Amino acid sequence: MTTQSTTLLIIGGGPGGYIAAIRAGQLGIATTLVEGDQLGGTCLNIGCIPSKALIHAADEFEKVIHYAQDSAQHSTLGIQVQSPRIDLAQTVRWKDAIVLKLTTGVAVLLKKNGVQVVKGWARVIDGKTVEIQQQGPQADAEPLRISCEHLLLASGSQAVALPSMPFGGAIISATEALSPQSLPKRLLVVGAGYIGLELGMAYRKLGAEVAVVEALDRALPAYDAELTRPVLASLRRLGIETHLSCTVQGMNAGGDAVRVRSAQGEESEIAADRVLVAVGRRPRTEGWGLETLLLDMNGRAVQIDDQCRTSMRNVWAIGDVTGEPMLAHRAMAQGEMVAETIAGKRRHFSPVAMPAVCFTDPEIVVVGQTPQDATAAGLDCVSAMFPFSANGRAMTIESTEGFVRVVARRDNHLIVGWQAVGRSVSELSAAFSQSMEMGALLEDVASTIHAHPTLGEAVQEAALRALGHALHI
Ligand code: FAD
Ligand code: NAD
């Protein structure tokens, strides 16, 4: 057995782990990061980045198809296109090249900051010791045992499988859906959440027929009905069937349809040659000795305090392994904070704003409290929305659907939430988060000059409207 020691040992090289490692390296902490699969974790390899690449390719293809159909009659914009086709293998190669560029970049950054990267699956021996069976050129070497002063758990999460439809063959998770070798004729998506709708819409735009089965009585149940309305309209326009309050029972005997049961107990079959199961993700806490630490848990997630400390001294946890919200930017922010805390800085994880974006068509972004959240919290708030139908820029990009909404305290006008739905509204999330982190009042946003013509003018107009004097409506 080879042995080593380090100050900080990080298990998992996803956005949580690699950011913690880079920051620790910058701060001069001796750091080792262990990754069993690929640097970049779920986010860079099989999550955020590849999904957004596929969504972009699907959007572009749909646009060209639209122009081709338009040209057959009369082109609104005067653009003429004939017989567009997509080479899916090339699309996947393009997506893989982006992933490779980013993951290679992470490796370079880690090296530059003096982080030792060990390739292999870590097994926890105790709160200060980890054993690794190395992979790659070191695969034949004897196991490596590393002792550390601080152990950071950043093992992420994995897709939840359905007992009635375990992954394999035609039943796939997002991972397989992001590297398709062919397009299914009929895709059935189980779960109308983030992954189900982001990828379901992309597959429809690429040419597959798509149906979605959701256990609850509405799609995107995490968002309020006003925000999801434009997305539901888009699902209808694209011809995606949604079966709400339904659960799947398994494939039929012929293997060409999924048996579905409604809340009333009625059974039916939906034809499908591929099934994407996207019913959530769960923290990756099993199979690598974590249970031997007997940490306090929050259900399946590792319980942490506001400094990402677990119940064991000098054992820390960040990102998806600590539960919801399972978002890459949360993992990164926690990773940076833990590195700084270990370096002796006084840090706490208490963000005023944690943006969440759903990359459907149109996109949804939420930061802070909705009007309903504010009411439930006992706050007396004003809220106002400004529709993109009254925004010049939205008209010039043919995307007048959706709106920006602001929520602020009635007494002092402190902004407590922003929501938006519409094309490219993900890019407004920076303005929303910054205004809240800086404690902006409605007046601050209303009196900020916003460039014209931009979608951002709807942000200023929402604030003006909450003050009772919107200018363009
Ligand atoms: P992960 O990224 O899961 O990384 C954990 C790493 O630890 C993995 O590389 C794993 O191999 C490694 N590991 C685990 N156990 C061990 C062990 N014992 N030894 C060695 N290595 C180990 N979030 C967003 O914010 N925006 C998005 O648009 C978005 N889109 C997504 C799309 C999809 C399809 C999916 C699946 C997820 C998406 N997410 C998105 C969520 C995001 O990917 C996660 O929140 C984020 O990756 C969590 O980071 P993490 O570092 O906690 O874990
Ligand atoms: P999700 O929680 O977003 O959605 C799962 C959906 O499946 C829910 O609507 C749920 O009601 C439904 N469901 C659960 N069990 C079901 C069953 N048996 N039958 C039918 N429906 C069922 O989960 P996801 O889409 O798998 O994504 C996992 C996580 O990954 C998300 O929670 C999010 O944290 C992260 N993610 C984020 C983004 C983003 O930020 N844009 C994108 C993708 C994934």
Image: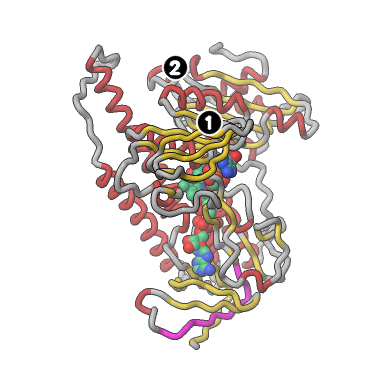
Which amino acid, by three-letter code, is at mark 2?
Answer: Gly
Which amino acid, by three-letter code, is at mark 1?
Answer: His
- Given residues 282 and 268, the one toward you in this image is 268
Is 237 rendered above or below residue 266?
above
Mark 2: few/some/many CA within 10 Å (<14, 14-19, 20+): some
Name the residue: 40% across, 38% down: 272
Q: Which residues are magenta?
A: 141-152
- Given the current orientation, which residue lies at the most extreme front position? 253
Q: Position of residue 222 (x, y in %)?
A: 61, 36
Name the residue: 57% across, 60% down: 284
Q: Secondary structure at mark 2?
A: helix
Query: Which residue is the site of mark 2?
Result: 392
Q: Position of residue 26 (x, y in %)?
A: 51, 65
Camera-near label (2 vs 1) is 1
Q: Image quarter for residue 467?
A: top right
Name the residue: 80% across, 31% down: 378
Q: Secondary structure at mark 1?
A: strand
What is the tally of numbered marks visible in this picture? 2
**Image position of 408 (left or right of 400):** right
Name the residue: 24% across, 20% down: 79
- Given residues 252 and 430, the one toward you in this image is 252
Q: Position of residue 42 (x, y in %)?
A: 47, 55
